[in-house]
Image (cartoon, helix red, strand yellow):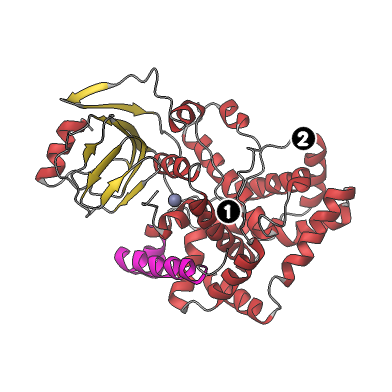
Amino acid sequence: MAGAALRLVTNNENAPPSSGDVDTASLIRAVADRGDRAAFARLYGEFAPRVKAFLMRGGLGAVEAEDIAQETMVRVWRKARLFDPAKASVSTWIFAIARNLRIDHLRRRSRPEADIEEREEEADPAPLADEHVDRRARDARIREVFATLPPNQHEVVLMHFYEDEPHSAIAQRLNLPLGTVKSRLRLAFARIKRELEDLS
Amino acid sequence: MNHHPKPETLAAYAAGALDEARAIALAAHLAMCVECRRGVADFEAVGGLALEALDGESMSPGALERFWSRAGLQEKAGAAPSFGGDIRIPEALRRHIDGDFDGIAWKPVSKGFSQAVLDAKGYRSGALRLFKIDPGIRMPRHSHGDAEFTLILKGAYEDELGVFGRGDFADLDGEDVHGPRAIGEEPCICLIATSAPLVFRGLFEKIAQRWVGV
Ligand SMILES: [Zn+2]
């Protein structure tokens, strides 16, 4: 599975930066502006199976994963108006929705008595004012840096975002000492940070 | 602010991989730090790329039709995430983050040092507590056995790594040894997050364990 993921990202290298995004962002806009169901169906085709795969990589069963993927897409449909391309790309936005739903799901499963209402109150927190962040430039640079990470770092970074307990899961899957996993991740994340230093 | 979380810590937060206690401590720092919010947003963008990189897992037949009826039934969907770190801090703690420490049930641990244990149960439980250290009081030098986050909410302390004031974040490895001493005129109040269960090995940890009562 990791091999397939690598191949896809390599393909992205040859595409103009964020070309995929322009497309999905305009689909979201069509959904937000006029409830365009055809546009949404295309987004759904693009993202629902990926979100399902993401959740299954994190250890959820196919049924749970599909249920949460559906819920993720419900939020995309309902919240399309809140999507702001100046704040995040479409994939980043959907990734964050799915990540939060995964945590909420696991939290409920491990602690069924946890009060759901407390969570509901947190709905749509006011975005913090982050002036002077050029998100597009940073995203383009991140895409570039990510595509050129050494393969062994690239692989662990991907897994770091998929796995539920990343360090131990990566160590086990790749049969590497925990220290090696941590240092590869450390190097990769430090490099991404460094490569963004000249951007606002 | 001079001390910030390490990049790998921001990335772990972006991936949703931190335990509850550490995620809360980190979110509390994000609430005060624009720079780290931008850092988390950067790593969320890596998460977006990771999502793009996946081969999709086929949805079961009729999934889109079921989606439409589900979307139609749900008048109000839940929260959409905000960016630069989706900041989710329990209401009870938000007050303390803002600098209001009234009504905390402090438990004295030793002279000039008290603590209050906070609820941080969740999917990955961690231990979350507030420390209050009077000026001039030094904690015994100790390490942690596992990563520890400390966020200064009020006052300041000084240790081997420097001076930490409000908003500063100590992102310590298991191997880091430190002995913070509260400085200034007012007690130093900090939020401490560790993963659970803590494993105490050395002498210093044992001392800390007795002090803190974990
Ligand atoms: Zn910071």
Q: Quadrant of residue A1?
A: bottom right
SS state under label 2: loop
Magenta residues span A168-196
Work out whether A176 lies above or below A63.
Answer: below
Residue toward you, B17 or A3 = B17
Work out whether A124 lies above or below A62.
Answer: above
The chain letter for the residue carrying disc 1 is A
What secondary structure is the stretch in magenta mostly built from?
A: helix
- The residue under label 1 is A55
Residue at the location (59% across, 61% down)? Answer: B45
Is residue A31 rendered to the left or right of residue B119? Answer: right
Q: Which mark is residue B64?
A: none
| Image coords of residue A118 (percent x, y) | 56, 27
Q: In the displayed image of the protein, which residue is found farthest to the left?
A: B203
Residue toward you, B178 or A51 = B178
Which dot, 1 or 2, sits closer to the camera?
Answer: 2
- The residue under label 2 is B74
Q: Quadrant of residue B157?
A: top left
Work out whether A122 lies above or below B84.
Answer: above
Residue at the location (61% across, 74% down)? Answer: A9
- Give the residue type that dot 2 points to: Gln
